[in-house]
Amino acid sequence: MSYKTFDGTSQAVSANRSNRPTVETLGIPSKAYQTITTTNTSASTTLSSTITRISILCTDNDVRYAVGTGTVTAVQTGTDAVTPFIQKDERLDIKVPLNAKIAFISAVDGAAGKIEITELA
């Protein structure tokens, strides 16, 4: 049996599975934040200082988000620096820098969105 690698080549897989690709687990849930309600103003939350992965769930309405250190602002509209999008009822698992902050803003003008954040240790 073989599988295709990202560069399109084939690699054999032995029955003892000793040459299988390494899988990185996302982590174990360690801290959950209560629902963060977003509006037309960017709202920022500071994550635990040692966390490098989080899971975010968007409910109610679409939301835009930004991750970083220092001052972090999510941008709703415009041609410059519009921040990443997460759709209603979508969950994203993402890597974040140490000492991260995450900011959210509603992607729909005038409609509140809600976010659930789970830190993964």
Image (tube, grey):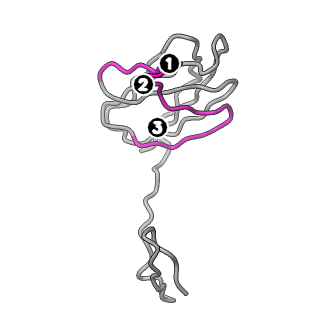
Which residue is identified by label 2?
A: 81
48 on left or right of 76:
left
Q: Which one is nearer the viewer's eye here, 30 or 101?
A: 101
Foreground of the two, 32 or 16 = 16
Residue wearing tag 1: 78
- The answer to which image quadrant residue 38 occupies is top right
Secondary element type, mark 1: loop
What amino acid is at disc 1?
Answer: Gly
Q: Which residues are magenta?
A: 70-95
* Dot 3 alpha-carbon crowd within 10 angstroms: few under 14, some 14 to 19, many 20 or more: many
What is the x, y in percent for residue 21?
Answer: 43, 72
Residue 89 x %, y %: 68, 35
Q: Is residue 74 magenta?
A: yes
Q: Residues within 10 Å of mark 1 (few under 14, many from 20)?
A: few
**Are the residues tagged 1 and 3 within 8 Å (C-beta)?**
no
Q: Is residue 98 left or right of residue 112?
A: left
Residue 11 position within the rendered picture, expressed as x and y whole percent measured from the top left: 45, 82
Q: Secondary structure at mark 2?
A: loop
Task: From this view, report whether residue 82 is shown above or below residue 96.
Answer: above
> Closer to the camera, 53 or 9?
9
Query: Could you tell me the amino acid type at mark 2?
Result: Ala
Which of disc 2 and disc 3 is earlier in sequence?
A: 2
Kind of element beneath mark 3: strand
Q: Nearer the viewer, mark 1 or mark 3?
A: 1
Residues at circles 1 and 2 in contact by the CB criterion of under 8 Å: yes
Residue depicted at 52% across the width and 27% down the height: 33
The answer to which of marks 1 and 3 sits earlier in the sequence is: 1
77 sits left or right of 71 in the view: right
Residue located beneath label 3 in the image: 119
